[in-house]
Every structure is written in structure tokens, then in C-alpha cells.
Image (cartoon, helix red, strand yellow):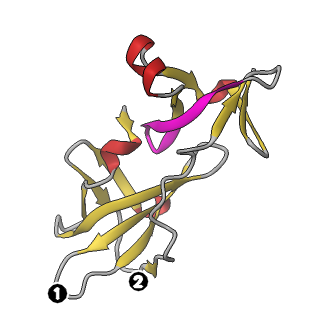
Amino acid sequence: MLYGRELVGLPVFDMNKKQLGVVKGYSAETCGSMKSLTVTTQGLFTKDILISAQQIAAIGKKGIYLKDFEQKPAKAPKNAAGNSFVGQKVFDSSGRCLGDICDIMLENQQVYAFEISRGIYEDLCSGRQRVNFSELHPCEQGFIKN
């Protein structure tokens, strides 16, 4: 298991174990599958590139390893460094806001849970809530918990 916040800053290696850069951000599909990583390349002329989830062989706490890096990666759009889902609201079935998504939990390139923040005071007093991804349904304002 890996938190989304742990992805940011991880080194990214090609299949020859040469470091390409570090993760700047990530995105996931609304179905929970990892979509892409925004990677800041190394070197004199750094740039942000998008790495699709299909190119990822393994994700671990020490780095991300790519399968095949033959194809030229797409240049990342300026807003691609965001972390999808973070900041979205979660509501219960009656419409009451449970809090904001502050992080995701990944297993095998799949989002399986969200960490929900109810504000700094509530987080300090009772901790953050964890909600399984399978219990949620997307809506216009964020997600609804069953």
C-alpha cells in the first residue's frame, strides 16, 4: 500500500535503471485506476512529462520503474501536476458533507481508499477518516458514500 503523497518526489527509472526524473504529481480515473504520472526530468533543461500508467512496471516506496520507455513521452500540460481527487468533497447519502479528500491509498496502481479530512481541529481530535473506494459513487460535487 502506498499513499498518494508518497508518490510525489519518488524517483522514476527506465528499464535500464537509469533515473529519468522525479514524480511531481499523479492522476487517476474516476473508476480508480491510475491514469498517469507527471514527472520532472533531470538535467540542465528540466521539463515536465506525462508517463501513462501502461508504461509503469512497478511502484514501490523507493521508486517507480517503467516497462518500456522507447516511445517519446508527451509534454505535460501546465495543470497536469495536480493530484486527482485531492480536495474533492465526500457526502453521505443524505447530502451531509463528511469532509474533503486529502489523500488516496494505492495498491497495484488502483485507488482502493481515500483519506478524508474534516478540518484541522477534527483531524487532531479524532484523526482522519478512511473510506474505501468501493463504497463511493462519483457525483458533480465530489463523491457520495453508500
**To which residue does mark 1 refer?**
44
Query: Which residue is the extreme one toward the top?
Result: 126
The amino acid type of the residue labelled 1 equals Leu
- Mark 1, residues whose alpha carbon is within 10 Å: few (<14), some, or many (≥20)? few
Residue at 65% across / 27% down in the picture? 134
User: Do the CB atoms of the residues marked 1 and 2 lie less than 8 Å apart?
Assistant: no
Which numbered mark, 1 or 2, is in the foreground of this view? 1
Q: Is residue 5 left or right of residue 141?
A: left
Q: Nearer the viewer, residue 116 or 122?
A: 122
- Position above or below: 37 against 18: above
Q: Residue 72, which numbered label?
A: 2
Q: Is residue 43 left or right of residue 74?
A: left
Q: Position of residue 124 (x, y in %)?
A: 38, 18
Q: Position of residue 139 (x, y in %)?
A: 78, 41
Label 2 SS: loop
Q: Nearer the viewer, residue 37 or 96?
A: 96
